[in-house]
Image (tube, rainbow, N blue to C red):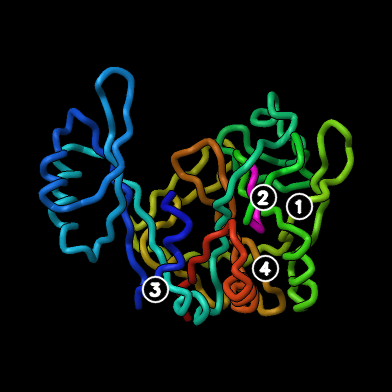
Amino acid sequence: MLSGALWESEEVKMEIWHRIMFSKQDAVDSILNSLHIRYKKSPLPGEHYILTFEIAESDHRWLQVSQLVREKNAPDLFDTVFTPEEILSAEWVRLIPVFEQGYPQPEATWVTRPINYECKCPQCGAGYRQVTPFRLAKEPRMGKHDFLCLYWTYTVFATSRVIGALRSADIRGFEVWEAVLHKTGRPSQVVSQLVFPRIAEPGLVVDAGELDTETCLQCGITKYGYHRRGYMRFRRDALPRDVDFVQTWEWFGAGSRSGHREILISQRVARLIVEQGWRGVRLKPLGLVD
């Protein structure tokens, strides 16, 4: 995923950023140097190495770089970065956890037998409902972060100052569950989980071929690919008006053995996150369709 600082860009409109990776065998060093592209050179065993850099599609060099990517079949991770103005002007915004630390416990068996979920499809990993608190191996080290997500999950844990601010602002639609330290059974003193029980009506609007889709033969759930380009669009009437947190009806994670619902937040929550400078999540505004 692109670096968390990019979403704070001061550009006047959303921007598509790419993270590109070339290998020594691609022999593009001289071309990148001639384009004055700054890259990171990471050594590999032997005399091999990889070159990594980020570039926006608005960059005048993007056309040449994109041609190189196609010619060399190079890895290209891309995502959309929105400005604070675009985020704060949206009625609804996607909340995407990006600061990951620690694994749900018991780690050795959690993937195949997650103790927190019921009704999880063993084939596609979707369809589950959380029924018990997550267990942590140890207290997380948050640093300057305010939100946390466990590896293998699409969860949101938050510090007490976040939870206190949400309550003070009368934010609706979330529950606070303890995060349990696995060895002691005691609640974490650093974070608690934010749980979002409300599920929206079906409302995702996609054009043909816009997102990959797959329907599980075992449970019948259709999963969509992760949305990266531009605004994710939703029908306005599919979203409730009496809460500030809601999960999508739709499941995402096509192409993987796991699935998740997207977390949507109201403008009120987005404003709190931006104005307070809370870290650990990325925000992406929704495009609403009447």
> Residue 285 shows which numbered tag?
none
Element class at badge 3: loop
Taking the spot 17% from the left edge, 33% from the top edge, the residue there is: 26
Check disc 1 and give the amino acid type.
Val
Residues at badges 4 and 3 in contact (C-beta under 8 Å)?
no
Q: Which mark is residue 142?
A: 2
The amino acid type, in three-letter code, at marker 4 is Phe
Direction from residue 221 to residue 232 in the image, left or right: left
Q: Is residue 146 magenta?
A: yes
Helix, strand or loop for disc 2: loop
Viewer-side residue, 95 vs 163: 163
Which residues, given as a range, are shown in magenta? Answer: 145-150
In this rendering, position of residue 283 left or right of residue 192:
left
The image quarter in which residue 92 lies: bottom right
Type of the residue with mark 3: Glu
* Circles 1, 3 touching at the beta carbon (< 8 Å): no
Q: Whole-Å distance between the Cαs marked 1 and 3? A: 31 Å
- Label 1 Cα neighbours within 10 Å, binned few <14 / some 14-19 / many ≥20: many
Rendered view: 186 above or below 264: above
Q: Residue at x 48, y 66 (%)?
A: 284
* Pointer 4 residue: 245
- Give the amino acid type for the residue marked by disc 2 in the picture: Met
Q: Position of residue 9 (x, y in %)?
A: 40, 68
Mark nearest the camera among 1 and 4 is 1
Q: Quadrant of residue 55?
A: bottom left
- Whether the magenta-drawn stretch holds residue 102 is answered as no
Q: Secondary structure at mark 1?
A: strand
Q: Which residue is mark 3?
A: 10
